[in-house]
Amino acid sequence: MQCPKCRGNMRTFDRNGIHIEQCDNCRGIFLDYGELETLTRLESQWAQQHYAPPPPPAHGAPAWGAPHGGHHGHHHRHERSWVGMLFSS
Amino acid sequence: MIEPSAGPAGAVLSSAAPPGAPGADLIARLVRLAPREGPVTVLKRSAGTGSAPGSSPVEPADRVVPPRPGTADAATDPQRAGGGVVVVRVGDVVLKAHPEGTSEDDLRARLDVAGRLPGLMLAPLGMERLDARLVTIWPAGEPLTPADLEAGDDDAPWEEGARLLARLHALPAPPELPPAGGTARLTRAVAALDGLPGVPPAIRAAYGTLPWSSLAAGRREPRPTATRSALVHGDWHLGQLVRIGGAWTLIDPDDLGWGDPAWDLARPAAWFASGLLATSAWDRFLGAYLAAGGVAVGPDDPWRELDPPARALTVQLAATAVATARRAGRPLDGTARALVSSCERILASARA
């Protein structure tokens, strides 16, 4: 098969059930009918697994609480002052 | 938090307290009060030099004000009344020199209660006097330390701490017991900002929205008549847990008294609300407290009771963090900034 854009040679790949053609010359990708939708669905599944919002606190949070109900401050947790605060009056 | 110990009593004070350094004499005299000889470790010295990481913020000697006899300050704020806390371990006992101005009657009442709660609070071995200071003597336990939390705050024994507090709160406060020290700590922390440069205005402004700010004028809190009064630790944090014979127990009855038990949950609640404590750790702590039948909060809406004292502890923690940074001439770190941000939101929600 020839690339519809640059007439280069197109190579076929099969990845995770998706059939794509890529041009060896211009690297352009040709998708079959319905495959863009399949890719979009797979991407959103992956994002859900990897960026799923953490479960909300089991017992609620105050109106004045930090955003994301306590998930805001992960970067503070390795500060020495934070660990010290856990132990001091 | 614990400085390495070495050698027998009297031989090891050089690293922790050079001869002539503030407190060296007191430490030597504390060591002599120990019933037996043993390796000496200075666990805490909150006045003078050499406060170890993780211990309470240093109260420089020049900020210690003398007690004003007959005022509520002297009665409720021993920390301001002179000489910080010094804690020394000698072999298998721990000796604690209390601040000058500590009420002997109040401390004795608190020690009596602690002595009657085996498995719940550590029982004292005795009380002595060194000049103007009271000294309490305790069996040495195995404390939880920051080193135990290297992997994060999820590693702390949150459930065990919560269950101990739930058991404490189920007990009636004996009539001779003074009020718990929580509200006095709040007032003290905000007052310690006086004269410091660069204090974010949100801290004092948020303090002004709290009901306890009107108590700062110096009178003791009126004793609540009914339901919101239980036996309260008054200063709970992870440093108040030690293992004795494999079981966790509460230590330090210095602020033990009657009061609103939600104050004992308010420090972790403030940490959580400020985004410092992981939601998972907070859920474990509060979940274990409720499962153990803790009475401080209702299981349907714990924040109904938690909200006011959690606001108070947020202001107190912010004030202490800012005062510590300003006295050391350091900028505010992420922990302090998170607490100041919470004060801003407390202020905004009070104005809404």
Image (tube, grey):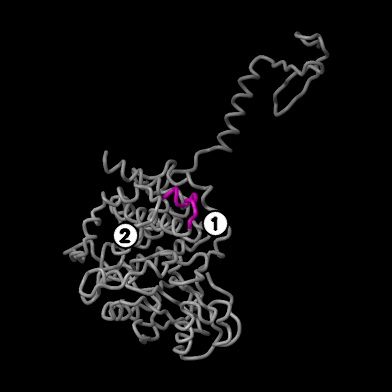
Q: Residues within 10 Å of mark 1 (few under 14, many from 20)?
A: some
Gap between marks 1 and 2 measured at Cα: 32 Å
Q: Quadrant of the C terminus of chain B?
A: top left
- The residue located at (35%, 74%) in the rendering is B82
- The numbered mark at residue B152 is 1
Res. B300 in view: no
| Amino acid at dot 2 | Ala
Helix, strand or loop at disc 1?
A: loop
What residue is disc 2 on? B191
Vertical position of residue A6 compared to residue B142: above or below: above
Question: Magenta region: which residues?
Answer: B329-339
Residue B253 percent across, percent down from the top left: 35, 74
In which quadrant of the rendered view does residue B227 lie?
A: bottom left
Residue B279 percent across, percent down from the top left: 46, 50
Residue B115 percent across, percent down from the top left: 35, 81
In which quadrant of the rendered view does residue B84 lie?
A: bottom left
B345 vs A22, nearest the viewer: B345
Determine the chain carrying the residue at label 2: B
Whether residue B129 sits left or right of residue B91 in the image: it is left
- The residue located at (40%, 48%) in the rendering is B340
Of circles 1 and 2, the one toward us is 2
